[in-house]
Image (cartoon, helix red, strand yellow):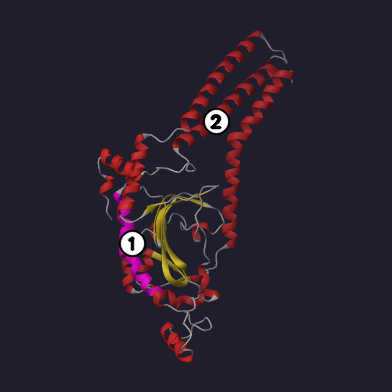
Amino acid sequence: MDIRWLTASDADVGAAIAALKRDSRPAWVPNKRQVLVHVNNCLLLWYLCIVFMTFSIRVDDFQGGQVTGTDVLDIVGSMVVFAAWLAGTVWLTRWAARPPTPQAQLRQWRQDLTALANGFEPRPRSIAQFSSLLGADGRPMEQFPRFEAPGIEFGNLTPYGPRAGEWRYLRVALPAPLPHLILDATVNDGLTSDLPEGIERQQRLSVGGEFDNWFRVYSPTEYGTEALYVLTPDVMADLIDHAWGFNVEIRDTSIIFFIRPGADFADPASWQSFGAILTTVVPRITAKAARYLDERVPGQDTSRLVTRIRAELDAPDVRYVAQEPRIGHDGRRLALREWANNARWGLRAAGWLALLTFLYVVPGLFAFAGFMSIVDGR
């Protein structure tokens, strides 16, 4: 990978971007300023909650529902603080809507120029458009940053809704489909696997040797031979040497490498790790996909070459059109642990809802109740 733009001078980076006339960051990508606005809004609501509940308890429980002059002065003082805070909130919201700082722009420009120098276009997406284990629960994911070349894309994936953490990923298109295969990197495990979805354990396959210490291999039950066809000794050696921290999924005509957390593309190591995978592991698996044919599928029991020769001999005047290779039904998808995945999704959704309720709804309701209690003397 050509990483010279990551260390180029600010002036050179600015001049290069000006010549390209490119924007730095999509408007839909949240930034730290917007996060700060949300934190401020939550604190403002909790301030109102504490103020009104404090005065409500004082008036109702200690003063028999009577509002004294001291209470009025204290409420006025609290409202002055609230008004000043509210004015600050308006300013903060406008500040958050401003363009990124020059430092943030330069950081993004360095990444974009590095991508262009290596033949990749910076093309973020608000919703990922490929299927994988990362999106098996149906949640949309945003892709930023995202760099793309014909048949290749990589960057960071962030799920919407209840956050499961940011992922860095590399996806490469294969010339033909392969049976579903997942390699679960063991070095990332905590108490359990870090895979975003659980897989039925009876589909685990041992390939023997050192590789089992680095990856757990999952293959459809009837397709163990195909997994061994892909995971030849040279491929396994490259995976251990260059992709030892990545989970790997082969699905249809894609191979996807993914790992937590998201990558910092201002760091040369992020580019070098993807470059190593693209130049070692990927070419070997791509070559295997080009040669593979699932003989379980009717009409695919002979090689592509033999099929073509027979067709041209039978109908020499008809232009031969090769059929798209297919994978048998049993080999297309691994069986997932649906009950565990649904339970995990439910817990995440419930936790996210509880957090939003605690941050916004609870203080709002208590502030309103406290205010009404002071007003009507109850």
Q: Earlier in the sequence, mark 1 or mark 2?
A: 2
Specify whether residue 216 is painted magenta.
no
Q: Which secondary structure class fits the magenta region best?
A: helix
Residue 212 position in % (x across, y down):
38, 68
What residue sits 45% from the left and 88% below the top? 312
Note whether residue 309 is visible.
Answer: yes
Q: Amino acid at mark 2?
A: Asn
Q: State which quarter of the image contains the C terminus.
A: top right
Q: Which residues are magenta?
A: 268-289
Residue 87 position in % (x across, y down):
53, 22
Q: State which quarter of the image contains the N terminus.
A: bottom left
Residue corresponding to mark 2: 41
What residue sits 45% from the left and 43% below the top? 26
What residue sits 69% from the left and 19% below the top? 374
Specify whether residue 278 is painted magenta.
yes
Q: Residues within 10 Å of mark 1 (few under 14, many from 20)?
A: some
Residue 377 position in % (x across, y down):
74, 18
Residue corresponding to mark 1: 277
